[in-house]
Amino acid sequence: SKEVSCQYQNLSAFPSDLSPSIEKLDLTGNFLRNVTEELMVNLKSLQVLNLSYNRLEHIDLKVLELTEELLVLVLAGNQLHKNSLSNGKAVGSSRKLQALDLSKNGLDSDAATSYLGGLSSLQKLDLSDNEMTRLSTDMFSGTPNLEVINLQNNHILEIDEGTFESLRSLRVLNLAKNSLSCIAGFGLIQLHILNLSRNSINVFVADETEGKYELQVLDLSHNKLLYFPLLPKLHLQHLNLSYNEITFRVPEPLNVTGVTGVRDGYKDITRLNKPRYSFPEVTDLDLSNNHLKSFPLPFLSNLKSLEHLTLSKNCIENVSLYLPHVSPMDFVGKEHDSMSVTGMSLQSLRSLYLQENLIESWPSWFFKLFPQIEKVDMRNNIIKPCSAQDEANGLWSPSGNHLRCASFSSIPTLKYLSLHGNHLTELPPYMFYQTPLVFLDLSGNENLVMSRYALAGLEPSLEHLNLAGNQMSSASFSPPCLERLKVLVLTKNQLEDLPSPLACSPLENLDIRNNTLQGLEDRVVQGWSRTLKGMLLSGNSFNCCSSNWLRILRDAKVDV
Ligand SMILES: *[C@@H]1O[C@H](CO)[C@@H](O)[C@H](O)[C@H]1NC(C)=O
Ligand SMILES: *[C@@H]1O[C@H](CO)[C@@H](O)[C@H](O)[C@H]1NC(C)=O
Ligand SMILES: *[C@@H]1O[C@H](CO)[C@@H](O)[C@H](O)[C@H]1NC(C)=O
Ligand SMILES: *[C@@H]1O[C@H](CO)[C@@H](O)[C@H](O)[C@H]1NC(C)=O
Ligand SMILES: *[C@@H]1O[C@H](CO)[C@@H](O)[C@H](O)[C@H]1NC(C)=O
Ligand SMILES: *[C@@H]1O[C@H](CO)[C@@H](O)[C@H](O)[C@H]1NC(C)=O
Ligand SMILES: *[C@@H]1O[C@H](CO)[C@@H](O)[C@H](O)[C@H]1NC(C)=O
């Protein structure tokens, strides 16, 4: 065999009878302390050596010279902070090594550096979960061909200028879970993926080097950013700014010390719609868990490729054309003008996540901004749906801008909508008219009353309807004939019987747990039994004397 695995065998010494033809040896989870010459002298063909989770503290100087073919060396979870100078010499002389894992070894910056001496072929390096505090320019001078570096979960406070710049092939850099507070003069044009999640970054300013950056993914989540990072023109596609303190407010006189130009830079942010801060290729933007108070439309309208926008868990109260505190001069007189609104539209936006804000209403033109929108999550807001009268008065009229309600009608691309937990008590008639929803979640709106025509218009499209936890009585639930409905969730209501129009629907799954049903109609159940796959019915007060419907379900092999 060319592969030998001796994982978790309580070995305290190298197995002695290994064949010289072995290419892959896995000794994970034993009690090895030393890697010695005489044991390795035979293993001339070894390409992959996994020594993770042992107690290694000593590696003979010649060991890796002997195993000339070694490509992958895993040393994670050992004691290699000990004897780092001599061990480092041994490891650092492995000319063909392509991947080295030194995670979880208690290494400080100097100790880590000593392992990286002459690894001229190394492409992938893992130094995560160590004790490094600083990265200096000499650290990677022996590893010029690195492509992927993982430095996650250290205590890195400082990175000297020039540390990564010489690594021409570097594509992926993970610095998540460190203690960085400021990224100034970021100039790593070669990077594709940069992870800075879970640091304490309050300033991020990149150098302006026209059009050269390759960065595609930037994760700045869980930091302390007060403002949008200052990025030059990028090919950035995925930008994660969740869990920061961004408000889009113009900075008060800045108290950032030590970084010249930052203040001027941030003054520019007041002119966010300038091309300098446009991100023409961003497709995913996550701004959840920040401190936004309104929907930052002028800024977002620069993100012409945006497909997925997450603004959940902010304090957005309403949608306005204005950035608070920014001079509205650019927009004066235009707010009534449908042309200027179209000019701001996000042509590619497909999903919009606005859950857990304080949104009550939006201007009647709001969804005209997103001509391709398919999915909207409005869970846990305080939406006030427009009545038919509001709609008639409001749409595209000058007063539409100030409409104090939220319209869901005439959104021809929208398929998925969640209005869970919005304290909705009433759904006005024709609420979703000309919006061909496939999926609608209205659960968690206690005491909801659904009028006869509330779902009118959804008959030919709706496939999934969730009305759980609404405490609806039979009198307040009158759906139309939903011709395509497959999944219906009615858990936790107070239904005494199911409304007859439901017999129309080709249901596949029905959940009627925790209602006050006494039975179901044989005729209706007979109809459903052709399509029904599963049905949940516990927590009702069914009458055992008339349970023919149950037999019908059993005969149809419905999972009950
Ligand atoms: C390793 O030692 C532990 C503790 O003595 C024992 O429970 C376990 O069975 C041993 N494993 C093997 C593979 O011998
Ligand atoms: C490991 O190597 C050290 C230094 O060469 C030596 O003192 C020690 O006895 C060795 N231990 C084992 C278990 O081989
Ligand atoms: C080394 O072993 C660890 C623990 O089993 C495993 O997670 C890792 O994938 C292995 N690495 C290689 C390169 O085989
Ligand atoms: C960045 O690192 C964090 C922490 O390990 C991780 O949760 C996140 O998924 C990473 N981000 C990306 C874009 O890979
Ligand atoms: C952004 O980061 C947060 C926190 O790490 C994570 O939960 C979220 O899924 C990320 N967003 C995207 C769009 O990947
Ligand atoms: C929307 O929010 C802005 C700023 O918070 C406020 O001035 C305005 O009155 C609000 N508009 C509506 C219609 O609630
Ligand atoms: C139904 O009600 C019972 C008793 O109150 C509760 O324990 C159970 O979790 C409820 N089930 C569902 C699906 O709500």
Image (cartoon, rainbow, N blue to C red):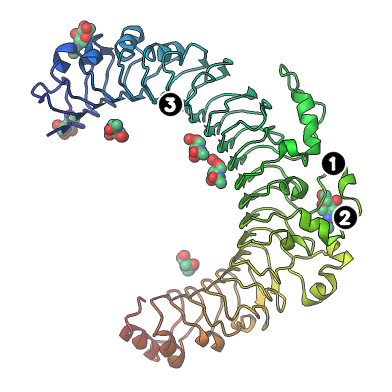
- Can you say whether 115 is above or below 515 in the image? above
Vertical arrangement, residue 211 with respect to residue 310, above or below: above
Q: Residue at x 77, y 77 (%)?
A: 388
Residue drawn 56% across and 18% down?
A: 159
How far apart in space, not on screen, are marks 1 and 2 (Cα)? 16 Å
Outermost front residue: 211
Picture disc at residue 128: 3
Judge the density around disc 1: few (<14), some (14-19), many (≥20) Cα neighbours within 10 Å. Answer: some
Q: Where is mark 1, residue-wise?
A: 326
Whether residues under marks 1 and 3 lie with C-beta atoms below 8 angstroms apart, the answer is no
What amino acid type should be assigned to the residue bearing mark 2?
Answer: Lys
Q: Residues within 10 Å of mark 3 (few under 14, many from 20)?
A: many
Q: In the current view of this chain or complex, which residue is farthest to the left?
A: 17
Quarter of the rendered structure image containing ligand 3:
top left
Q: Residue at image x 81%, y 45%?
A: 323
Query: SS of the residue at dot 1?
Result: loop
For label 3, being within 8 Å of ligand 4 is answered: no
Nearer-the-camera pick, 149 or 509: 149
**Mark 2 packing: few (<14 Cα in 10 Å), some, or many (20+)?**
few
Q: Height in image: 25 above or below 363?
A: above
> Tag on residue 334?
2
Q: Please tell me whether mark 1 or mark 2 is closer to you in this view.
A: 2
Q: Earlier in the sequence, mark 1 or mark 3?
A: 3
Query: Is residue 220 left or right of 503 when viewed as pictured?
Result: right
Residue 370 is situated, as x and y percent measured from the top left of the image, at 69, 59
Camera-side mark, 1 or 3: 1
Three-letter amino acid code of the residue under disc 1: Val
Q: Nearer the viewer, mark 2 or mark 3?
A: 2
Are the residues at dot 1 and dot 2 in contact (C-beta closer than 8 Å)? no
